[in-house]
Image: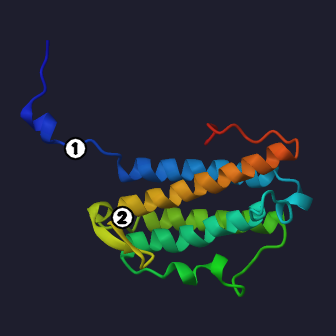
């Protein structure tokens, strides 16, 4: 029988920044598949129960991800109320192709910005979008959780349209 050493008990178990990015990008790949699955004539118009069309949900994810990762990396935040989904002047793609191109642009921003994180930044407490004090890693998890939540709404829309959504586990 083996026993844990004092050193192994004191060493915290955590996800690496690279694994966290991989998880987030896996979710982004899956959400992109959901966008692709929507019929062109429904992506911008279809909704249920007073929810927004999926294009608007995807735009919220886009508008939060870019400034979210930049704020997380630098500590320079914009307020929630200044994000694109709160502003009629923000770019609003009118086609699926344009929405996917915008999605891909933000994916590149996330990948690049991730390389700019200072060592130890993930554990620092910061005012996420100038609103909530939390560790940086928790703010990033919020961005991932928000995406999963809205992607699930897209799954409901697709199923109500008689369309099989992408497998929820297929993030590659």
* Helix, strand or loop for disc 2: helix
Which residue is situated farthest in the right direction here? 41
Residue 82: percent from left, percent from top: 56, 84
Residue 99: percent from left, percent from top: 75, 66
For this view, does 111 lie left or right of residue 15? right
Which residue is situated farthest in the bottom direction here? 89
**Residue at 49% from the left image edge and 49% from the top image edge:** 22
**Residue at 29% from the left image edge and 68% from the top image edge:** 125
**Quadrant of res 164:** top right
- Counting residues from the N terminus, which is met first, the one under dot 1 or under dot 2? 1
For this view, does 159 lie left or right of residue 169? right
For this view, does 91 lie left or right of residue 25? right
**Residue at 12% from the left image edge and 21% from the top image edge:** 3
Q: Which residue is mark 1?
A: 12
Which residue is situated farthest in the front direction here? 49
Q: What is the C-alpha distance between the residues marked 1 and 2?
A: 17 Å
Q: Is residue 119 visible?
A: no
Q: Is residue 36 above or below residue 55?
A: above
Q: Which mark is residue 32?
A: none
Do the CB atoms of the residues marked 1 and 2 lie less than 8 Å apart? no
Position of the C terminus by quadrant? top right
**Quadrant of res 77:** bottom left
Q: Is residue 145 above or below residue 82?
A: above
Indicate the colouring scheme: rainbow
Q: Which residue is mark 2?
A: 136
Residue 41: percent from left, percent from top: 92, 60
Q: Is residue 162 above or below residue 49?
A: above
């Amino acid at each position: 029988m083996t026993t844990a050493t004092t050193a192994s008990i004191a060493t915290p178990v955590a996800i690496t920044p690279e694994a966290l990015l991989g998880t987030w990008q896996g979710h982004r790949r899956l959400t992109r598949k959901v966008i692709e699955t929507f019929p062109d004539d429904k992506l911008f118009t279809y909704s249920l129960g007073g929810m927004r069309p999926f294009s608007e949900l995807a735009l919220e994810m886009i508008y939060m991800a870019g400034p979210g990762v930049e704020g997380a990396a630098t500590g320079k935040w914009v307020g929630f109320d200044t994000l694109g989904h709160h502003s009629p002047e923000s770019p609003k793609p009118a086609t699926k192709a344009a929405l996917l191109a915008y999605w891909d642009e933000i994916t590149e921003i996330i990948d690049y910005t991730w390389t700019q994180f200072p060592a130890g930044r993930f554990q620092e407490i910061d005012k996420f979008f100038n609103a909530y004090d939390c560790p940086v890693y928790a703010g990033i998890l919020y961005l991932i959780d928000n995406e999963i939540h809205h992607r699930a709404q897209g799954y409901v829309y697709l199923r109500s349209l008689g369309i099989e959504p992408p497998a929820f586990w297929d993030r590659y």
